[in-house]
Image (cartoon, rainbow, N blue to C red):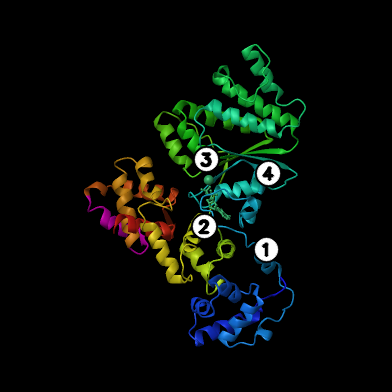
Amino acid sequence: MARGSLQLNSEWKTKVEESLAIKQLTQKLIAEQLNISKSSVSKFINGKPIAANNFIRICQEIGLDWGLASQEEPQKNDFENFKFKTTNFKSNPGGEIAPQEIIGRERLIRQIWEILEQQSLIFVGERRIGKSSTLKKMASEDNDKMLPIYRDLEGIRTPIEFVEKVWQDIELHLPEEGKATKVRNFLSQLQATQFTGFHFTEIAESHWKSLLTFAIEDLVKMQNKQIVFIWDEIPHMLENFADRSAMEMLDTLRSLRQTYPDIRMVFSGSIGLHHIFKNLQKAGYRNDPTNDMYTIDGQPLTLEDAMKLTIHLIEGENIATFNVEKSARDIAEAVDCIPFYIHHLVNQLKTLKEEVTHSVIINTIEECLHNPLNPWKMDHYRERIDNYYTEDQKPYVLNILDLLAINPPTTFTKLWQVLYNDPETNNKEMARTIIRLLMKDYYLIQTGSIYSFRYQLVQQYWKLSRGI
Ligand SMILES: Nc1ncnc2c1ncn2[C@@H]1O[C@H](COP(=O)(O)OP(=O)(O)O)[C@@H](O)[C@H]1O
Ligand SMILES: [Mg+2]
């Protein structure tokens, strides 16, 4: 603790809270009466060091013996120490964050590594639940057996662009001498002069399959670790390709996985691959190009990790709360432990001039969901229905989601009783199919025979945005 500062012994926290309740004092009132900042009062209550004179004045104000209240306590455990070290956390909704700011996910990452020892995998999950962050954290870890190579493929529009990126990534991971010789020799032959650059020339375009194979061979030959290509937003990339190219790419990647056992692939992204496959099937594709891959369904943070992240952000942003752990729980639970919305919510709360309480949290969420500027990007939940469902499927989707948004979780039989009255939704098998699709797209979950929204935040958005 800095000289000239004092902090509350954690055993006194309850006494402080009791005194505040008895005297009907809030943090805001104390701050105003003593003319000190609300964040100092919040720090005081949460056991953080504050200027000694302020510490003494607050104790006097609430009738406590400052000498006893500030007595040193025995060594704190690691979790407590960790909390104090991380006060520089800032809310950063949707922004790039450093691996050490990515909270939790240790068990998931361990599970992914274990699966990768056996086979390649697909890591799916609702957008914004933290898939990319998990994969980036994983790729930043040292691993003696595996070499993870992370690449976001969102903007890639053609197979040759993809192969160029893969090759560039491979070159970066090869030792200096004799880099990617097969690729370079092949390109030199094609253009009939020595190829020395870091970008493919036009002539390479029609040879993308050979180039990809050579690049992988170069890497396999020169690396003794298991290579893990982590390809994020791969469905986005495939969606950008012409149908034929997308089919060829999926088949080529599958055959590379079979030919080179030292290669593993992680496919990730927020568009379900089932949508991509469905479109390719319409164009005549009959293969099942990922049936050798294990699927992991990404989940939001655990409540414990979501609270940990929230506490870091509340402290990093110096937000006044009556009880930081309780506010963290309220925030985490209100946004289904989805880290993206935790960042957003804290970011919003920091602009308010009032102490954070449960009702402030609930009101702030409602305002953000109401905001026509769509700051939390929730309109996506409505818009993607137009992109991924056919005209005759849409009435089912809208009716089912509308029904579940305003009613308690229910059975198919109950839903059907309403659906069949509408001439646009009176095909029972279609209703079943759509419910299954809505589960695949993370709108709904099924518990026993009961269906409900998977995330209450999405349910709340749906209700508000549809005015129902
Ligand atoms: N484990 C985490 N700890 C802290 N912040 C996280 C974590 N996971 C995600 N975030 C935040 O949420 C945002 C969205 O997460 P991201 O990993 O991009 O989700 P996805 O890839 O599933 O769409 C990130 O930019 C980051 O700010
Ligand atoms: Mg992502």
User: Considering the numbered disc 1 on the image, is that residue within a helix, a strand or a loop?
Assistant: helix
Give the residues drawn in magenta, as a range: 407-422
Residue extending furthest top? 192
Mark nearer the N terminus (2 vs 1): 1
Mark nearer the N terminus (3 vs 4): 4
Residue receiving disc 1? 85
Query: Is the CB of the residue bearing disc 2 within 8 angstroms of ligand 1?
Result: yes
Mark 2 touches mark 1? (CB < 8 Å): no
- Classify residue 405 by image quadrant: bottom left
Alpha carbons under labels 4 and 2: distance apart: 34 Å
Q: Residue 450 in the image: state x and y as whole percent.
A: 39, 60
Q: Residues within 10 Å of mark 4 (few under 14, many from 20)?
A: some
Mark 3 touches mark 4? (CB < 8 Å): no
Residue drawn 47% across and 43% down? 272
Alpha carbons under labels 1 and 3: distance apart: 34 Å
Residue receiving disc 4? 117
Alpha carbons under labels 2 and 3: distance apart: 22 Å
Residue drawn 69% across and 35% down? 262
Residue receiving disc 2? 343
Query: Is the CB of the residue bearing disc 3 within 8 angstroms of ligand 2?
Result: yes
Q: Which mark is residue 233?
A: 3
